[in-house]
Image: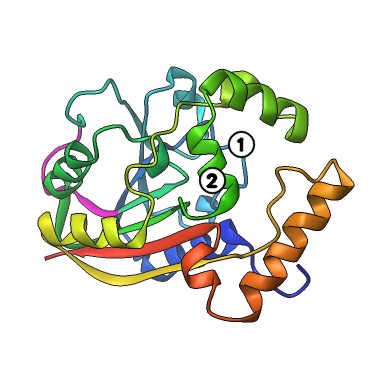
Amino acid sequence: MAGRLNDWQTYHEWVEHRIEAGMTVLEVGCGRGDIAPFPWRRYPDIRLVGLDPDPSAEANPQLSEFVSLNGGPWQVPADSIDLVICRYVLEHVAERENFFANLRRVTKTGGRFVFLTPNLRHPAILASSILPVSWKRRTLRLTMGVDEDDIFPTHYRMNSESILRSLAGRWGFGVERLMTREFEPCKYLDRFSFGFAAFYTYFQLMSAGTLGRLFGASILGEFRKL
């Protein structure tokens, strides 16, 4: 929408707010850096470590170092990271306690964790959580032209504010900021006029009052290791 930041632009603002010279930043699920990448070239003195299960992510040109994620402990030294970030990754995590155990181990005391993830209460996300992976891949290929090889299994085990707050408390993180919001109309059915109309109407409803705090599409958060 004109004059309004979308989800990843707002996430980028939150990340920029926490960057300081000389930091070591860990991007969990760094990918190949080809989808709306963060402008790391503005911060040449930042050491950016990328963590991803996809070996092709090693080609991400913005990384200072790549670490393969193989399902075990993160191969990152303890208390070495100033800022951990991830965008649309938490929904793919099958074992949330292991995720937070790794997160706490690698983050320095006072370090931050900034993330963007879908809200399970949103109708499109709820439908996604029910559909088999094969159906989901076909649907996204047909509706959004997404390559099926770029669609990974989702679990949605950290996709509500209440669960995230609970996990933060259990693993020694303070909640600095946490919000749910509908940033823009959902694009899943943009190719179809009825789909566009339905999601635009939903967006208007979520933007008009407090419903967006419950049923908006995205959750943005910032935690601090205590």
> In the figure, is residue 90 to the left or right of 141?
left
> In the figure, is residue 137 to the left or right of 50?
right
In the rendered view, tell whether residue 154 sits above or below residue 216: above
Q: Which mark is residue 34?
A: 1
In the rendered view, tell whether residue 129 sits above or below residue 113: above
94 or 147: nearer the viewer: 94
Q: Which mark is residue 130?
A: none
Q: Main secondary structure of the magenta part?
A: loop
62 or 56: nearer the viewer: 56
Question: How far, Cα to Cα, is label 2 from label 1?
Answer: 23 Å
Q: Mark 2 or mark 1, which has the lower sequence index?
A: 1
Verify whether residue 80 appears in magenta: yes
Which residue has dot 2 on it?
125
Magenta stretch in the rendered image: 76-83
Look at the numbered disc 1 and give the secondary structure of its residue. Answer: loop
Q: Amino acid at mark 1?
A: Asp
Q: Seen from this angle, which residue lies furthest right? A: 193
Mark 2 nearby-residue class (10 Å; few <14, some 14–19, many ≥20): some
Look at the numbered disc 2 and give the secondary structure of its residue. Answer: helix
